[in-house]
Amino acid sequence: MSHFRPILAAHDVTEQQWRVIRVLYEGGKLDATELADKASILAPSLTRMIRLLEERGFITKHKDEADGRRVLLQITPAGEAIVTEVMPESLKVYADIDARFGVQRVEQLLDMLEELASLRLENGSVGEE
């Protein structure tokens, strides 16, 4: 993330805010539980972040027409604008990492990280082996 922090800071967006905005950009309308899972953010942190991103005009909340108890979150045009501003710079960083580390090694690393993240052990913690 050290490569991406300056880019995000230049746009006054934190890493977690970026993950939320990007997940909504890619995923459309999502409820908070889905969003927290896809953005890898704990629910209490997401609750505060939703309020802030809504105040900044990056996301909106809507009641689900099929289930009035469910609230859906959606990116706004202002949120989409942040993504379109940040993505070219972000893609340059990814291209540099691929060039310096190797595409195959990056893919292997991402596969291993995904496998690690998917481990579901008792009590949500990694056990001693």
Image: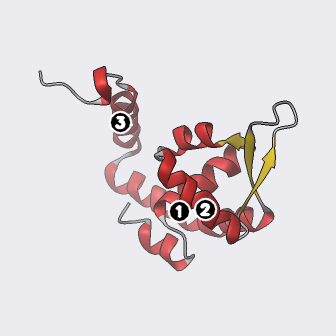
The residue tagged 1 is: 90
* Amino acid at circle 1: Ser
Which type of secondary structure does the marked residue at label 1 adopt? helix
Viewer-proximal residue, 93 or 121? 121
Given the current orientation, which residue lies at the most extreme left position?
129
Viewer-proximal residue, 116 or 105? 116
* Amino acid at circle 2: Met
Residue plotted at (66% across, 68% down): 82
Q: Are marks 2 and 1 in contact (CB under 8 Å)?
A: yes
Residue plotted at (55% across, 68% down): 89
Viewer-proximal residue, 85 or 11? 11
The residue tagged 2 is: 87
Identify whether 72 is placed above or below 121: below
Which type of secondary structure does the marked residue at label 3 adopt? helix
Q: Quadrant of residue 124?
A: top left
Given the current orientation, which residue lies at the most extreme right position?
65
